[in-house]
Structures are given as structure tokens and as C-alpha cells.
């Protein structure tokens, strides 16, 4: 039986960051910390996911913002994370910090509802050997559900030039926006592939929000991306009173 979390007078946000430095976990999360504070959150920052084993901290958190690409998670830390979400703590993140974390933990992948598979690159002749090889122009397309959802209210389809995530997902996600990978002569797949780009997921009493754009601080500062992530964190942080 899921025990709902109590509403607290001061909301608390736990920011957990680390993993692969290519996603700039410190600079990326610093973009959103002032927003959380303006929204009345007391923000705690941790550089290790072992904080998930601290039951008192997890029970007090209304929102977890995770930016940990790849890396690993201990059994106890994952158990603490999942327990908190099941009891009503919101979980939010973007790009590899949430959708490419802890590849060796299948239970984490089930909790999040989507796993990074690849980001197709430019034509081999156009590749220069750095991260820009994977920067492609693409469109984030809102779904009918997304257009009616509070996270995307008033927004429209928008274009980006950055990594376009191809993710493996399941039907428990509420997909708010998608992106389509075209087929090119140099690709081994044979038809366009549509992947979720923004989704929400309910797990126990908790809410999960994932946005796949967010490779760099520059992308996170895009007006559409930033608005969506800010709204997504607020949506996920809803608490359930007894």
C-alpha cells in the first residue's frame, strides 16, 4: 500500500548532480536553482546519489532534480529513490541526466520510462570528430495531449539544433511531445523513427517528468526548453496530503 506524503509548509527540492562531465551537471543545474528558490523551495545540492539512502532527507523532499549522466547507483540508493517517488516525491530531469543514468539498473529504467539509445550523427563526410558531429536540426512536436497539458500550455512546436535523442520507452508514459528521426542513405534503419521528447509518468503517489533536450547549458537556456523544464519541475513536485 502506498502511503501518501504529507504536505509541508516549506517545500524542499533535492538537486543531485554528477556523472559524465560532458553534460555540465553543475552549470546545468545552477540555471534552475534560482527559479526553484523563487518558487519557495529550500534547495539542497548533493554531488552523490548516495543521498538517496538517507531516509530522513528523502521523506522531506517534495522534488528531486537529477542530473547524473551514466554513472552507477547502488542497490540501497535506488531503493531509496524509488521509495520516495512511490510515496509522492516528484522526480524531474532532462537529457542524459535522467534518461541516460545508471544503464546497468533495469529497475531504474522502468521507473523513468525511457532509456537513451542513440543520437544519430551527421553524414560521415561532415563529421569532424567532436560533439558537434551529433548536432542536427530537428523539431520538437507537441502531441494533442501535450497541447492540453499545463506543462506545454500556450507553446507550439519548436526547432532545435543539438543532439536529437532516440529513446526506448513503454506505454505507461504520457507523451507530451515527440521528435522524428528521418532515414538517411547512410543510416542502417529503413523508415523514420518517432521518439518521445517530453513525457510524464506516474509511479505510486509520485510524478516523474522527463525532457530529452538539454545537452548543454545553451540548449537549456532556449526559451522553450527552459520554460518546459521549469513547468515540469513544478508539475512533478505536487504533493499528496493524507
Image: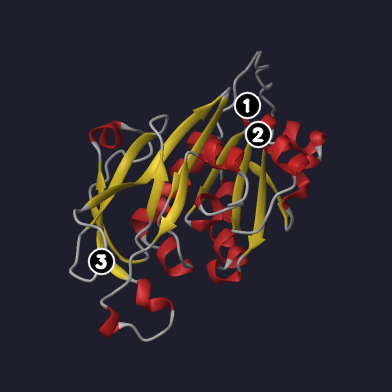
Between discs 2 and 3, the one toward the N terminus = 2
Asked if residue 128 is positioned above or below residue 201 in the image, the reply reads: below
The residue depicted at 65 percent of the width and 18 percent of the height is 4
Q: Secondary structure at mark 3?
A: loop
Quarter placement of the N terminus: top right
Residue depth check, mark 2 versus mark 3: number of the one nearer the observer = 3
Residue 39 occupies which quadrant of the picture?
top right
Percent coordinates x, y for residue 139 in the rendering: 24, 57
Asked if residue 162 is positioned above or below residue 131 in the image, the reply reads: above
Asked if residue 27 is positioned above or below residue 78 in the image, the reply reads: below
Q: For mark 3, does the 10 Å Cα neighbourhood hold few (<14), some (14 to 19), or many (20 or more) residues?
A: few
Contact between marks 1 and 2 (CB within 8 A): the answer is: yes
Q: For mark 1, does the 10 Å Cα neighbourhood hold few (<14), some (14 to 19), or many (20 or more) residues?
A: many
- In this picture, residue 184 sits left or right of residue 120: left
In the rendered structure, find residue 82 and report the number of the disc placed on it.
2
- In this picture, residue 154 sits left or right of residue 111: left
Percent coordinates x, y for residue 73 in the rendering: 70, 49
Q: How many angstroms separate mark 2 from mark 3 (CA)?
A: 37 Å
Q: Which residue is mark 3?
A: 187
Q: Which residue is mark 1?
A: 86
Percent coordinates x, y for residue 190 in the rendering: 20, 56
The residue depicted at 51 percent of the width and 57 percent of the height is 96
Amino acid at each position: 500500500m502506498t502511503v501518501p506524503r504529507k504536505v509541508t509548509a516549506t517545500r524542499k527540492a533535492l538537486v543531485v548532480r554528477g556523472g559524465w562531465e560532458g553534460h555540465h551537471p553543475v552549470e546545468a543545474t545552477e540555471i534552475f536553482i534560482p527559479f526553484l528558490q523563487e518558487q519557495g523551495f529550500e534547495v539542497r545540492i548533493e554531488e552523490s546519489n548516495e543521498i538517496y539512502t538517507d531516509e530522513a532527507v528523502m521523506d522531506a523532499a517534495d522534488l528531486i532534480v537529477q542530473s547524473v549522466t551514466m554513472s552507477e547507483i547502488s542497490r540501497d540508493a535506488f531503493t531509496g529513490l524509488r521509495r520516495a517517488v512511490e510515496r509522492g516525491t516528484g522526480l524531474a530531469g532532462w537529457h542524459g541526466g535522467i534518461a541516460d543514468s545508471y544503464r546497468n539498473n533495469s529497475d531504474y529504467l522502468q521507473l523513468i520510462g525511457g532509456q537513451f539509445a542513440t543520437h544519430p550523427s551527421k553524414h560521415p563526410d561532415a563529421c569532424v570528430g567532436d560533439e558537434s558531429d551529433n548536432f542536427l536540426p530537428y523539431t520538437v512536436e507537441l502531441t494533442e495531449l501535450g497541447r492540453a497539458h499545463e506543462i506545454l500550455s500556450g507553446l507550439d512546436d519548436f526547432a532545435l539544433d543539438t543532439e536529437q535523442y532516440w529513446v526506448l520507452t513503454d506505454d505507461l508514459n504520457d507523451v507530451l511531445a515527440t521528435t522524428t528521426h528521418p532515414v538517411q542513405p547512410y543510416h542502417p534503419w529503413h523508415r523514420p523513427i518517432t521518439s518521445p521528447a517530453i513525457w510524464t509518468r506516474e509511479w505510486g503517489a509520485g510524478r516523474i517528468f522527463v525532457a530529452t533536450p538539454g545537452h548543454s547549458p545553451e540548449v537549456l537556456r532556449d526559451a522553450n526548453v527552459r520554460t518546459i523544464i521549469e513547468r515540469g519541475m513544478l508539475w512533478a513536485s505536487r504533493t499528496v496530503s493524507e
